[in-house]
Amino acid sequence: MATSDLTGALDEAGVSYELLPHAHTESALAEAESLGVSPDDVAKTLIVKLPEGYVRAVLPASARIDLRKVRELHGGGRHNVHLATEEDLRRDYPEFELGAVPPMGGRSDPVVVDPKLAARTSIVIEAGSHDESVRIAAADLVHVTGAAVTDISED
């Protein structure tokens, strides 16, 4: 089960969380609607491919990623910093459903969390599947992942 990689990582870190089953959704905005919460409370995790590997970019469901800001953080030119392809995700994140990679679990990647999420008391993240999410304290997410808190959203 895809969710067990995330919940196992949270259990190992001693972090409290709430598992939230919901109807099958294909986007973070749909996930928010299904759960009856604001899109600002739901985080989406985008996998960005860099020359040296991947970074998991975590931002509000209502926001769009600014790849220029990610490039400035991690270096790299315009053509070698981009969102991971479906092929990349299938190959490198096989433990999670396509499009539902959480901020942690599975392989170890650097994590960047947008400050709009880090400032919230709690957030909802994908649990590795399209029909389960996890509510977690935003501070716990930042701490457990060792995330950099940096603006990565479009203005």
Image (spheres, rainbow, N blue to C red):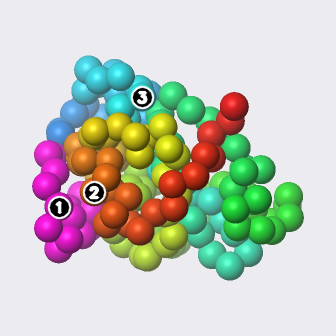
- Pointer 3 residue: 40
Q: What's the magenta region?
A: 3-19
Relative to residue 16, is residue 145 depicted above or below?
Answer: below
The residue under label 1 is which amino acid type? Val
Q: Position of residue 62 (x, y in %)?
A: 51, 28
- Pointer 1 residue: 15
Chain-order first, disc 3 or disc 1: 1
Proximity of marks 3 and 1: CB atoms separated by less than 8 Å: no
- Work out how far the residue at label 3 is from the one at label 1, CA to CA, in angstroms: 22 Å
* Occupied quadrant, residue 82: bottom right
> Is residue 10 highlighted in magenta?
yes
Residue 91, visible in the rendered structure: yes
The residue under label 2 is which amino acid type? Asp
Residue 94, visible in the rendered structure: no
Kindly report which numbered mark, 3 or 2, lies closer to the viewer in this rendering. 2
Relative to residue 74, is residue 41 depicted above or below?
Answer: above
Q: Position of residue 9 (x, y in %)?
A: 24, 69
Q: Nearer the viewer, residue 99 or 125?
A: 125
Q: Which mark is residue 140?
A: 2
Q: Which mark is residue 33?
A: none
Relative to residue 24, is residue 132 depicted above or below?
Answer: below
Proximity of marks 2 and 1: CB atoms separated by less than 8 Å: yes
Q: Nearer the viewer, residue 36 or 151?
A: 151
Tag count: 3
Chain-order first, disc 2 or disc 1: 1
What residue is drawn where x is 41% and y is 46%? 118
